[in-house]
Amino acid sequence: MDATLSIKAVARIANLSIDTIRAWEKRYRAIVPKRAHGGKRLFSTTDVERLVLLREIVSTGTAISRVASCSTAELRGIMQDAAAGGESDDADVVRLLRAIRAHDVSLLCGDLLSVALVRSAAEFGDDVVAAVLTELERDTEARHTGELLLASALVSVSSTLLEKYRTDGAPTIVTLTLPGEPHAIPPLLAALVAAEAGYAGMYVGTQIEPADIEALALDVNASAIVMHAGMESYEHMQAALRLRERLPRVRVVVTGRGGRLAPAGLLAVNSLRDLAQYLENLAA
């Protein structure tokens, strides 16, 4: 990954102080940033992921000296073992909700990125974002504004997350919703899942007309179209089926509750984990 992030930006994203990052670098060689002309530290998104993993592990009481020399893959394994042992993501959900209710978009963006960098895209969506949305659903005062703030923050951080997974020359998967479906969060998360599975995930937007979807799919030579259907609509399923028929080389995947009505010829998946599994099998 290209190293383009300043230590100030990394400190905000990883929720660490600049002094801590410098100490972990100098004393423990836990991170080795690149240096620009003049000695300025430059970090990549992979470096940020490593710092977030270290922060999470150290917060459990483990000394930095014990894990500083671990590879990033080993750090991920430590986190997975901790999760299997029963640790909860509630603290992350509470932190995100606090930022949403404070209307602090900058803090929310940093917290979202911090959480997303240490989880798979499917886990981030199915577990963390879904839990936040569930809590917002119970809060009638914060529900609408909260969803808008969350969607805005996800748009802001998606470029960094997509860069984390970027593979040059990968086939494109476009994600979107049809007219009448205004919710941006599900197709945004689907784009991240597609990117992690080795594709070029392209979030197109919401309420896209079928004719525009067809033109775009042809223009970018898309391998698949992933459309979120939050409501049950036979009209939407027929529009999706027509796209499948007009684009025989393009797979059409439906996510969300509306997928219950999907006719033969369309694939409906129930979760981002299911989508990830399908795309991984497709790539194989």
Image: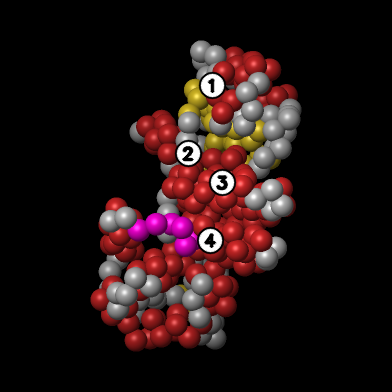
| Distance between mark 4 and mark 3 Cα atoms | 12 Å
Give amino acid for label 1: Arg
Q: Report the residue at 43% width, 34% height from top.
A: 274
Q: Earlier in the sequence, mark 1 or mark 4?
A: 4
Q: Report the residue at 30% width, 66% height from top.
A: 71
Q: Residues within 10 Å of mark 3 (few under 14, many from 20)?
A: few
| Distance between mark 1 and mark 2 Cα atoms | 16 Å
Indicate the secondary structure of the residue bearing disc 3: helix
Question: Up-down: is 158 above or below 282?
Answer: below
| Distance between mark 1 and mark 4 Cα atoms | 32 Å
Residue wearing tag 3: 134
Give amino acid for label 4: Val
Residue wearing tag 1: 260
Q: Earlier in the sequence, mark 4 or mark 3?
A: 4
Label at residue 94? 4
Q: Earlier in the sequence, mark 4 or mark 2?
A: 4
| Distance between mark 4 and mark 2 Cα atoms | 22 Å
Tell me whether circle 4 and circle 2 mark residues in contact (CB < 8 Å): no
Of residue 108 and residue 77, the one placed in the foreground of this image is: 108
| Distance between mark 1 and mark 3 Cα atoms | 21 Å
Give amino acid for label 3: Thr
Tell me whether circle 1 and circle 3 mark residues in contact (CB < 8 Å): no
Residue wearing tag 2: 272
**Any part of residue 109 in sight:** no
Location of residue 63 in the rendering, given as x and y in whole percent from the top left corner: 30, 78
